Image (tube, coloured by chain):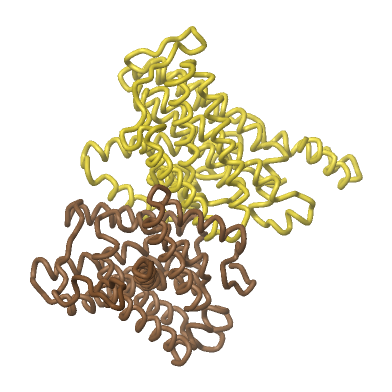
Chain colours: A brown, B yellow
Amino acid sequence: MLTILFDGVAYGMLLFILACGLTVTLGLMNFINLAHGAFAMAGGYVTVVMMNRYGISFYWCLPAAFVVTAIVGLVLERTLYQWLYRADHLDQVLFSIGLVFMAVAGADYFMGGQQQLINLPPELSGRMDVGGVGIGRYRLFTIVVCAILALVLQLILSKTRFGCRLRAAVDDRRVAMGLGINVPLVFALTFAFGSGLAGLGGAMGAEILGLDPNFPLKFMIYFLIVVSVGGTSTVSGPFLAAMLLGIADVAGKYYVPAIGPFVIYALMIIMLILRPDGLFSRGSGR
Amino acid sequence: MTMVQQEALVSRQSSDAAAEGRAVRLMKRRSRIRIYEIVIWLAAVAAYFLLPSKMLILTEIAILALFAVSLDLVLGFAGIVSLGHAAFFGVGAYAAGLLALHYTAEPVIGLFVAALVAGLLGFLTSFLILRGSDLTRLMTTLGIGLMMAEVANQMAWLTGGADGLSGFSLNPILGLFEFDLYGKTGYLYCLAVLFVGMMIMRRIAFSPFGLSLKAIKSNPMRAGMISVPARKRVVVVYTIAAMFAGIAGALLAQTTSFVSPDVLAFHRSADVLMVLTIGGTGYLYGGVFGAVLFTLVKDALSVVTPQYWMFWIGLILVVLVLIGRERLNRWAAYLPERLSGKEREQ
């Protein structure tokens, strides 16, 4: 029971790290970026290539995955995304689906269609027993890293000047620009950071979520649920939503395997009926 | 009922008969048959005689066109971006397949049953898409699409799971026309269904009902203020679109005598969005134009790169969006009104 809860928390933490970049993109620019999963996949593949081809330590791969995907994100943002901020949602959806298709086929071409495996360092693999509860070491590691990241994110958003600008821009873009905040710059940096986080999440999740070319398609629905349940205005909203989704998904697949895959959809529908504007909406539905 | 309501509304609002006459003229003008429509249907029939070896791809085009036009009702008229329209297509396909396997092999009954089942699903899920913003709608439609795919996968005792449904054959259509090996009957059958479906959807789209949908699309609140019941209208149009998508799915199941889980796959929903992007939204025939172009491009690509055509489809999508849909469809503006699908304000 507790083991499942633990696994669910680890899963939810990963989902949060994967999706939180998307919440910012959505909240700040009202841009529906379905290609977010492609960045996560990129991070995962960076790790796989570095570890399996060049034998670099797993601990170095994680920051590398972050940096590489952040750079990719920045480049794409400056070259492609920025032209579509004012486009309507249909265009954004089509554009990002196009990117997803390209990423899926590209990953298939370069890396092959099989599941990618990574060999974790020995101190992270296996389970340990704490008070009768079996705890996967790697899951513990995931939880710790993600919790630290979530905390840091919260602090950046609430305490630093950059976070302040970001929040101002999310709340009202025009006024923020009027106050002399360079919103495009803030956004480019945030987009890069969010992509980097997705890459990091993809790298860490390669072990738990699996990694194959269909990754962006498989997890698109999870990201969308996290973002629309959690709302785009806070860090805590998506965090709780990701936790809820992670725990429900793991528990559902464990206790009722026959209907396990439907748990997230059931959750989605219940949420839609009870709180159509998200769990923590502030009334201003975008 | 809605027609009557709308007419009553129109007449109440325009106290003088002149305005009413103008409204009637406008509706007539909007709904009259344009020359390009006649050309399309003639070309479609001519293709039967001119391209006897291309029946299968023509059938594919006709089915995709019906599917795309049904999405246009939702997307181009009601303005709902759906990522899960394949749910209805797939449900229709499975309904037709199961009916042929277990009950009756009459194709036309299969179409009606498929429309009924898909319409029911559309009706039930339409209440979910009424809620929330564009983002929640994307999530909901995508979620419903994935959920149906998962259902088909899990209920292997009914749907055959990953192997799909096969082993059913169909009786001659209405007891008269037998399906042949080359797909000639299949093509004419699909074309006939497409034509009938198109005429019905055309009637819906260019009625006051269709006009009120466009009002809802551009501003739901204002539409509400001129007493357009936005929620009810969306439910109705979503259900109708689901029915036609189900019919398209049934056509695929009947002409191929096979239903694979692929009918519910996500890429099908994305494909049909792309079809509409190529052809243009909001005037129905965009689905037909788009289906022709899309199928030809996809066919050519899958010959060149059997495994990686998805990449090029993705690239085309990105480029299309970056160029801009308006710019792509601008050529139509240079045509005389009778030729083009554009509406001009009076």
- Can residue B118 be seen here? The reply is yes
Front residue of B60/A48: it is A48
Q: Is residue A55 above or below residue B301?
A: below
Identify which residue is drawn at 48% across, 35% down.
B91
Q: Residue at the front extreme?
A: A132
Q: Position of residue B226 (x, y in %)?
A: 79, 53
Indicate the quadrant containing the N terminus of chain A: top left, top right, bottom left or bottom right: bottom left
Q: Is residue B195 above or below residue A257?
A: above
Front residue of A224/A132: it is A132
Left or right of A285 in this view: A216: left
Q: How many marks?
A: 0
Q: Is residue B80 above or below residue A233?
A: above
Indicate the quadrant containing the C terminus of chain A: top left, top right, bottom left or bottom right: bottom right
Left or right of A159 in this view: B50: left
Front residue of B207/B230: it is B230
- Can residue A70 be seen here? The reply is no
Identify which residue is drawn at 28% across, 75% down.
A71
